[in-house]
Every structure is written in C-alpha cells, then in structure tokens.
Amino acid sequence: MESIIFDRRMTNSSSNLTPTVMPFPVSDELLGTFVPIAVYWIYSGIYVMLGDLNQYRLHTKAEEDKKNVVSKRTVVKGVLIQQAFQIAVSLLLFTFMSGDSGVVLLQPSLPVIVLQFMVAMVVMDTWQYFMHRFMHINKFLYKHIHSKHHTLVVPYAFGALYNHPLEGLILDTIGGALSFLISGMTPRTAIFFFSFATIKTVDDHCGLWLPGNLLHVFFNNNSAYHDIHHQLYGTKYNFSQPFFITWDKILGTHMPFSLEKRKEGGFEARPIKKIN
C-alpha cells in the first residue's frame, strides 16, 4: 500500500506541489494470516460459481440436503467465527514473538524452499493425523468438539473449515505453527505454504471428482479419500489430512476405495475392504 503526500517547495515566482510516495508496507506475518483466509473464500467461491456439476458429484444433491443437519448459512457463520478466532490467536502470537530489529529475512534458494515445503507438509500431516484420530477415539472430544465437523456427512467446499473453534486451534493453528517453526521457513514462504494447504483442504471437502484435477494426480489424499471418512461407516478410517495417506497405511486405518459411476449421474466412492 502506498500513500501520496505533497511537499511544498517555494520558488521565486510560485509554489509547487511535488508528489512524494510514502510506502506503508504490510508485514509478511500479517499477509500469512489474512491471505490464506482470502484464498479459502475465493477458491471455495469458484466451486460455488461452477454450480452443482451433478455429473461429477460424489453424492447427489438430495443426499446433501437429507444427510447434512446444518444449514449452509450456519456453516458460513461457523467458518467466519473460527477464522476470526484464528486471526486473534495469530495476532497475539505475533505481538509476543515479533522483534524490534525490523530485519527482513532473506529468502533461501529454491531447493531449500522446496525442502522446507516438504518438511512442513510432513509435520502438518503427522500432527493432524494423531490429533484428528484422538478426537475420534476420545468420546468426550468427539461429542463436544469434533462432531461439529461431521454434521456435514456430505461435505462441500466452503464447509472445509466448519469446525469447533477449539478444534481449529488444535489442528490448524498449532499444527501450522509447528510446521512453520520446524521447517524453518521464512514468513514469506509461509504465505505460499498456508495458502496451498488451504487450497488442498478446500479441495478435499469439495464433494466433487473433477477431471484433470492436478491435486488428484499428485495426492492420493483427495476428495474421494476424505469422503470415505465423512460417511457414517468411515469414521474409523482415513484420518490422514491434508496431504499424504502415509500414517493411515502405517497404522492400519487406511480404507482403499473404488470410484464407481452412479446411475443418477456422478460418482460414488465405495470401500473395498470389510468395514469393522
């Protein structure tokens, strides 16, 4: 952002107004807080503008209306509340952690940034797998916290972050902080990492199997994989999020599926192992 002020310079004949540009930079920390939120609504908004896309849906519109027990208005309100809570926590952390030196960290080389991305992805996946699974195992936590997210049996894009604020703090805010600190990335790199993580999370909850989706090409943890977890029979499986399926495979909670075409149009993700 820039502000223009004018210096008055006197000459023998007249006075001139000369524009001087005064920069008001926005810190990378603030951008890392607000850009992913903007990305969330822009990316999920694209899915809304695309319409129902019945030929690519993992559930029919009738199933969405019947199985989900909260209105979309309530979901939007819930996501905004969580994001406001997330902003408050982030700003509080920045207040205590920011130094007075004003030194801007230099960006490392591209190979180092790629390595930091990979480390951050592994850290986030590990944290979210075990916290997510624990919220299912612990009956109190599931009933009073995590069940809110599972009121969307048929997930859709802008419901990706429809969680209890405490769940958002534990899974997303703390998980993100650990990813940032352990990977050693700069705040500028973090803007891109958290924006990418946001896109991935929205895509995993979009309820669609779109052709040519590059996230489905590069990640086995995708909308169909996570849809299995959201079904009433699937809450013991596919806890991994948002990137890889490694921990599910290592710890025996992986539920493979087949993607079948429905007669009514669209697709259905069907488990190919016996449900316990």
Image: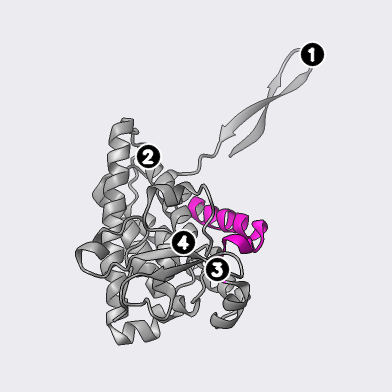
Q: CA distance from mark 2 to mark 3?
A: 58 Å
Q: Nearer the viewer, mark 4 or mark 3?
A: 3
Q: Nearer the viewer, mark 2 or mark 1?
A: 2
The residue depicted at 27 percent of the width and 40 percent of the height is: 115
Q: Nearer the viewer, mark 4 or mark 1?
A: 4
Q: Position of residue 69 (x, y in %)?
A: 55, 83
Q: Which mark is residue 102?
A: 2
- Binning the other alpha carbons within 10 Å of mark 1 as few (below 14), some (14 to 19) or many (20 upward) gives few
Q: Position of residue 111 (x, y in %)?
A: 29, 33
Q: Which of the two discs, 4 and 3, labels the residue nearer the N terminus? A: 4
Q: Is residue 18 above or below residue 147?
A: above
Query: Seen in the image, is 210 located left or right of residue 245?
Result: right
The residue depicted at 32 percent of the width and 38 percent of the height is: 114
Please name the amino acid that badge 2 sits on. Answer: Gly
Report if the CB atoms under discs 2 and 1 are less than 8 Å apart. no
Q: CA distance from mark 2 to mark 4?
A: 22 Å
Residue hosting label 1: 13
Residue hosting label 4: 87
Please name the amino acid that badge 4 sits on. Answer: Ile
In which quadrant of the rendered image does the C terminus lie? bottom left
Q: Is residue 51 visible?
A: yes
Q: Nearer the viewer, mark 2 or mark 3?
A: 3
Q: Which residues are magenta?
A: 35-59
At numbered mark 2, what does the secondary structure look like: helix, strand or loop? Answer: loop
Residue hosting label 3: 262
Please name the amino acid that badge 1 sits on. Answer: Ser
Query: Seen in the image, is 81 located left or right of residue 237?
Result: right
Q: Nearer the viewer, mark 3 or mark 1?
A: 3
